[in-house]
């Protein structure tokens, strides 16, 4: 019957057997889209024992890592498995007891090692297991804390090959300020030279043990005193910051030593018309004055024709300086420095050490003296200058020169005009003397006449008596 349905097996619209249906999914074992066996699926995580993110030991990294052939990060096919990151757990820290030394009361100058003490009751744990490391403060143990300082305690441990640290909160420290004393004050120099009334200010530094103090924060110089004249000056220093108190340090202001002076001397020569050398002492550009700044003494070695000038310094200068000089070929050995008064009638005598046979002329103040105004005698050379020549000289100092063929001897002498001092001159003295002699003669003559007349009267009286 055409209208009768055919056998289902023959119905073309009826789905065929699943095994024959092309749209029917195949057996899972043969389905290409079906995931394969977990053992063969590359996206399937490997065995937990081979998980690369699983640590191989503790966080201290004290155990050895697994061998290379057992590296769980390597797949059978040689491909590296993907890594995942897990956050590190923070160690649990029990900080040790912290104490400060109290014997004596903490004062600035103690080191951190002397000041801070850590107890042995600190601990650290990670994942319930003790974590090995050590506790210390975050300061150099030999450094000095300031009077208001702070520090923290640090725990240091090893994580694998990495050194890690954990730090506590800050601990405040309060110290007493350290007093300064004179032994800490260093002056440079400790002795200064007089500076002609200017202030002497030695440099000031302070040292606390081996530590040099900072002038910008540890101390300040408050002033100098008595530092302008020869004697003892002082400087006052006040502590600041970590230091306290005020101290005075003393220093010496000494006279200028002879070593700081320059000296020059010009040897005596015949043309100088003097037996005294020219001597100059200076301090820098300042020239010293004989009598005020030094006293000078001269000595002569006539045979050696040399002399020595010895200067003894005084006032703002100190010490002695000796200079040598050459003498002229000849010297006046006697009569130098003589004083002749115009009231005198005596010759002025000089003696020179040259041989008389070498004598050539006599000079006074560089001018030749005529030969009729002096006489010569041997031994070596004795010169007698006549009074009538000396009377022609003005009052004051003069230079006499005894010249020889190979040199000249010089000396200074003085002529004193007594009339200027209110005393009669030599002529007036002679007139007075004659007047005195005349008066005496008259008196004597009168006395003789009186005696003669009286004697005559006595004789006449006797004759009368005899009659």
Image (cartoon, rainbow, N blue to C red):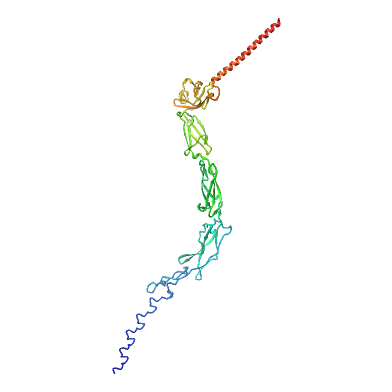
Q: Residue 335 location in percent, x, y? A: 52, 26
* Above-or-below relation of 274 to 97: above
Residue at 55% across / 20% down in the picture? 428
Residue at 53% across / 62% down in the picture? 171
* Above-or-below relation of 247 to 343: below
Q: Nearer the viewer, residue 195 or 57?
A: 195
**Farthest residue, direction bottom:** 1
Which quarter of the rendering shows the C terminus?
A: top right
Asked whether residue 49 is in view, the answer is: yes
**Farthest residue, direction left:** 2
Which quarter of the rendering shows the N terminus?
A: bottom left
Q: Residue 35 location in percent, x, y? A: 37, 79
* Above-or-below relation of 435 to 81: above
* Above-or-below relation of 44 to 172: below
Q: Residue 121 location in percent, x, y? A: 55, 66
Q: Quadrant of residue 455?
A: top right
**Farthest residue, direction top:** 467
Asked whether residue 334 is in view, the answer is: no
Q: Residue 40 location in percent, x, y? A: 38, 78
Q: Nearer the viewer, residue 311 or 466?
A: 466
Q: Quadrant of residue 102?
A: bottom right
Count of marks, rendered view: 0
Residue at 65% across / 12% down in the picture? 451
């Amino acid at each position: 019957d055409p209208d009768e349905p055919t056998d289902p097996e023959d119905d073309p619209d009826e789905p065929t057997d699943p095994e024959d249906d092309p749209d029917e999914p195949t057996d899972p074992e043969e389905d290409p889209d079906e995931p394969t066996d977990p053992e063969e699926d590359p996206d399937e995580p490997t065995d937990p024992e081979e998980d690369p993110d699983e640590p191989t030991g503790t966080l201290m990294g004290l155990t050895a890592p697994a061998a290379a052939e057992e590296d769980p990060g390597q797949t059978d096919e040689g491909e590296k498995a993907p890594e995942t990151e897990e956050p590190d757990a923070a160690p649990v820290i029990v900080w040790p007891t912290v104490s400060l030394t109290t014997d004596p009361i903490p004062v600035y100058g103690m080191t951190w090692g002397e000041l801070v003490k850590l107890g042995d009751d600190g601990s650290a744990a990670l994942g319930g297991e003790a974590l090995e490391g050590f506790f210390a403060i975050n300061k150099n143990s030999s450094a000095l804390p300031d009077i208001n300082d702070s520090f923290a305690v640090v725990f240091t441990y090893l994580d694998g090959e990495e050194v890690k640290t954990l730090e506590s909160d800050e601990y405040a420290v309060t110290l007493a300020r350290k007093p300064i004393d004179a032994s800490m004050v260093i002056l440079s120099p400790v002795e200064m030279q007089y500076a002609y009334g200017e202030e002497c200010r030695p440099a000031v530094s302070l040292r606390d043990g081996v530590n040099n103090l900072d002038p910008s924060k540890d101390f300040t110089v408050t002033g100098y005193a008595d530092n302008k004249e020869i004697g003892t000056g002082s400087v006052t220093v006040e502590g600041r910051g970590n230091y306290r108190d005020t101290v005075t340090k003393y220093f010496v202001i000494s006279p200028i030593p002879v070593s700081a002076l320059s000296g020059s001397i010009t040897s005596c020569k015949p043309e100088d018309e003097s037996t005294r050398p020219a001597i100059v002492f200076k301090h820098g550009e300042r020239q010293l004055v004989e009598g005020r700044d030094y006293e000078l003494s001269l000595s002569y070695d006539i045979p050696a024709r040399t002399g020595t000038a010895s200067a003894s310094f005084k006032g703002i200068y100190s010490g002695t300086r000796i200079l040598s000089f050459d003498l002229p070929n000849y010297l006046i050995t006697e009569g130098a420095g003589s004083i002749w008064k115009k009231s005198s009638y005596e010759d002025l005598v000089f003696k020179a050490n040259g041989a008389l046979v070498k004598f050539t002329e006599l000079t006074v103040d560089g001018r030749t003296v005529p030969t009729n105004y002096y006489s010569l005698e041997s031994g070596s050379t004795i010169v007698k200058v006549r009074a009538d020549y000396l009377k022609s000289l003005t009052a004051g100092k003069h230079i006499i020169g005894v010249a020889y063929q190979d040199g000249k001897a010089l000396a200074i002498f003085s002529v004193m005009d007594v009339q200027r001092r209110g005393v009669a001159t030599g002529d007036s003295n002679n007139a007075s003397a004659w007047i005195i002699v005349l008066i005496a003669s008259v008196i004597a003559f009168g006395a003789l006449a009186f005696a003669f007349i009286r004697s005559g009267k006595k004789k006449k009286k006797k004759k009368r008596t005899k009659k």
